[in-house]
Image (cartoon, rainbow, N blue to C red):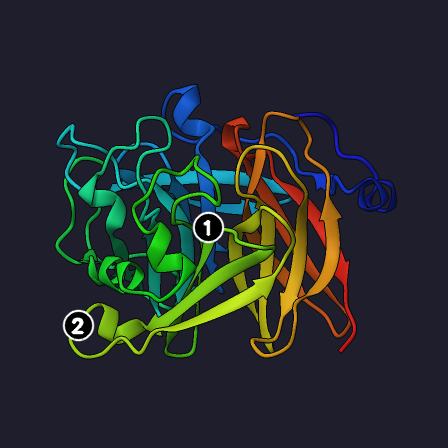
Amino acid sequence: MGAAVSGTAAQNSGLGTAWKEGPHFTGKKKLRKSISGAACAPVVPPACIAALDEKNRTQFFTFSDRTLKPGPVMAIVEDSGNGDPDTEGAAYADGFFYLLGSHGLSRKKDKFHPSSFLVFRFPVDESIGKPAFDISADTVAPEIARSDRLRKVIRKSPGVIGDYAEKPLGKKAGGANLEGLTVIGKRLYVGFRGPSSKGRAYILSVDVDRLFGDGDLAPVIFTLELGKNIGIRDLAAVSGGMLILSGPVQKKGAYSILFWDLKNPPQKLQDLAMPDPDVKAETLLVLGQQDDSYDVLVMYDGIADGGPREYRLSYSR
């Protein structure tokens, strides 16, 4: 990773301020390039998890002095050799971490892997943001809950979402594929990278506790005008709504960060430039919120250890 550029110059270029290169995440370089989401518990020091779209695990990390510091690895499904869960999003709320499977077919061979159609949840000690149970890189802890109920909701959704459920990802509008995740109150929100139809992208919300239990999930679909062939790459809760990291459904297109109050059209805050043409912005972490700005961290799928870059986003209400 190159040296950080000044905040003003970086902001004007759309590249943000590069963080320092730190210790490596666990695994071979391909796995270290697969960070597709992250979330942190609001403790000091930050206690965070990374969603990895390769293998059957998550990895804990923290950060300080603009440096990521990886921690233990935790298995979330048994490594059966029948496909990984393809986790694409992470969230934290009220003492629980969440991880989101892509809920889509495999990108290269259009294969169905049941573990990709799961949402995971596990509790942590809210004072330190870490599990009170023993974790292992090889054995799945019984405290890790999983739900496959979102799959049925997507398949039965009206219109474009249901039409493209479990369809190949590279065709036309793109098969249904989740990448964004956040939890606000008692609702879990997932953002669709695809499909994108007529400039519209989609967010689905369900009751978070019923997702891991019984009862009607009370699904609600939101349609957002984000632009032709633009989908959602990540979501992050903030006061008054959420931030949306948007990007292309397929390989090439524009990336942006927007604020959405859950009622009105999203407000664009920042266009992003990619540090390399072969990488994708897929992770949005909120570092802090002021009266007129957010400090956020963007991480990239395709760069070893996420290649984090920091932005200060100005906003007005």
Q: Residue at x 50, y 55 (%)?
A: 46
Residues at marks 2 and 1 touching, judged by CB atoms closer than 8 Å: no
Q: Is mark 1 on a helix, strand or loop?
A: loop
Q: Where is residue 61 in the image (x, y as percent from the top left)?
A: 44, 44
Tell which of 273 and 35 is nearer to you. 273
Q: Circle 1: is it few (<14), some (14-19), or many (20+) Cα within 10 Å?
A: many
Is residue 18 visible in the rendered image? The answer is: yes
Q: Please tell me the numbered disc located at residue 213.
A: 2
Name the image quarter holding residue 116: top left
Q: Is mark 2 on a helix, strand or loop?
A: loop
- Which residue is disc 1 drawn over? 195
Tell which of 156 and 9 is nearer to you. 156
Name the image quarter holding residue 151: bottom left
Q: Circle 2: is it few (<14), some (14-19), or many (20+) Cα within 10 Å?
A: few
Is residue 76 visible in the rendered image? The answer is: no
**Which kind of residue does numbered mark 1 sit on?**
Pro
Q: Distance between the residues labelled 2 and 1?
A: 28 Å
**Relative to 18, is 143 above or below?**
below
Q: Please tell me the numbered disc located at residue 131.
A: none
